[in-house]
Amino acid sequence: MTPLLFDPGEEWEYGSNIDWAGQVVEAITGKRLGEVMQERIFAPLGMANTAFSLNPAMRARLARIHQREAVGSLTPLTDFELPQDPEVHMGGHGLYSTVGDYCRFIRMWLNDGMGESARVLKPETILTAEKNGLGDKKIKMLPGIIPSLSHDAEFFPGMSKSWALTFMVNDVDAPTGRRAGALGWAGLANLFYWIDRKSGIGGFWATQILPFGDPTPFLGYIDFETAVYQSVSVRNAA
């Protein structure tokens, strides 16, 4: 029942669109989204620690989210947890996972849809998924509506950025070394990833800190991505 801010196609705004796409998948398959993901993504990629609900082994390794306070300190949110066995499996958020599992997912995109032992997506599907879908419209700053959850945030301010089916696409080379046409996005607790298919490089920076856009993890991520490209450049030069 969320109201529209504008008619479809007039502007771009980050919202619940991917969650709705997950509901479409459930309607087509007759299965819960988590079950479809397990069969078609997690199992073929060996992502054994990714699910909408925690099993005992996952819970034993759960990293708690911390809240940045006004004085700069971090407070653990001991009661902050996504619902177990949620009523709706959201296509755009809600999974528990690990850095290793998510890197397997990133590697699949770098390898034209191929996992370590099985194909997940066709190469032509990968090409479709990385194409700009906005035409001349561009991604804008993300407004932080709830201050405890998110600051106003923008990746590479002042740089032209488009949107593919599920990813941000930087239209020009980024200052970190990321090539034009690379894919990327983020998770609310300051988790950031990129997939640079031209360079064959991808990465994942994972924290559990709120609000989104907190300067410390965000700048740490930018330094991390920059260091990866510098390391590759030095290695290639040698």
Image: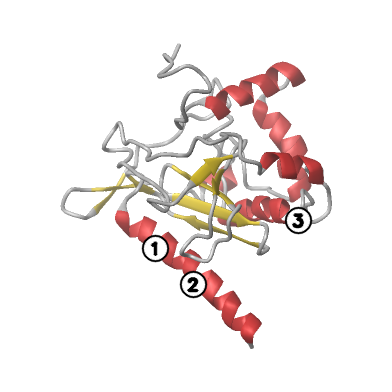
**Residue at label 2?**
227
Q: Give the mark, 2 or 3, whose residue is nearer the N terminus.
A: 3
* Residue drawn at 39 percent across, 63 percent down: 220
Counting from the top left corner in percent of width and height, residue 64 is at 40, 47
Residue positioned most to the left = 71
- Residue type at tag 1: Gly
Q: Secondary structure at mark 2?
A: helix
- The dot on residue 111 is 3
Q: Is residue 11 above or below residue 158?
A: above
Q: What is the quadrant of the N terminus in the image?
A: top left
Q: Quick one: label 2, few (<14), some, or many (20+) residues within 10 Å? A: some
Query: Helix, strand, or loop for circle 1?
Result: helix
- In the depicted view, which residue is nearer to us: 56 or 231? 231
The extreme top residue here reads: 1
Question: In terms of depth relative to the viewer, which is nearer, 102 or 144?
Answer: 144
Sequence-first disc among 1 and 3: 3
In this rendering, position of residue 142 left or right of residue 83: left
| Mark 3 nearby-residue class (10 Å; few <14, some 14–19, many ≥20) | some
